[in-house]
Image (cartoon, grey):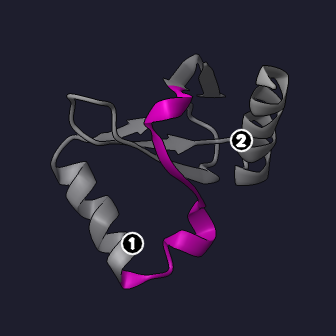
């Protein structure tokens, strides 16, 4: 199953490590350092040109970590995840 992050960008659910609110997460120094390092390493992928609202950290098996910046709110993404999981039961 995949989760749509916005602007034709989708990721496999199994690869998702965490979904974070960009406003709350980016206030911590360690998070800012993590995002700066990810950007320097070319791991940031922007899912759309709208105002970013979420950070989605993914770690695909056998590949490098990826950090998606999504215009969708974390609650929206989590709601989609719950909907997908409930449809599997």
The dot on residue 31 is 1
Front-most of residues 23 and 60: 60
Question: Is 18 located above or below residue 14 in the figure?
Answer: below
Residue 5 spot, x, y in % from top left = 61, 31
Residue at the extreme front: 89
Residue 37 spot, x, y in % from top left = 21, 60
Q: Is residue 42 left or right of residue 51?
A: left
> The C terminus is located in which quarter?
top right
Q: Does the segment drawn in magenta span residue 22?
A: yes
Mark positioned earlier in the residue sequence (1 or 2): 1
Q: How many angstroms separate mark 1 from mark 2 (CA)?
A: 20 Å
Q: Is residue 17 left or right of residue 73?
A: left
The dot on residue 77 is 2
Task: Give me the residue at 34% from left, 40% from top.
Answer: 59
Residue 43 spot, x, y in % from top left = 27, 41
Whether residue 87 is visible:
yes
Tell me where the magenta segment starts and ends, as one range. Answer: 12-29
Residue 63, quarter of the rendered image: top left
Numbered disc 2: secondary structure = helix
């Amino acid at each position: 199953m995949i989760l749509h992050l916005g602007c034709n960008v989708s990721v496999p659910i199994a690869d998702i490590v965490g979904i974070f609110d960009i406003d709350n997460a980016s206030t911590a120094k360690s998070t800012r350092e993590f995002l700066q390092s990810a950007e320097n390493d070319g791991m940031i992928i922007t899912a759309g040109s709208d105002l970013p609202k979420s950070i989605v950290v993914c770690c695909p098996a056998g590949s490098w970590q990826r950090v998606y910046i999504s215009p969708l709110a974390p609650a929206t993404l989590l709601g989609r995840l719950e909907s997908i999981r409930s449809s599997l039961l």
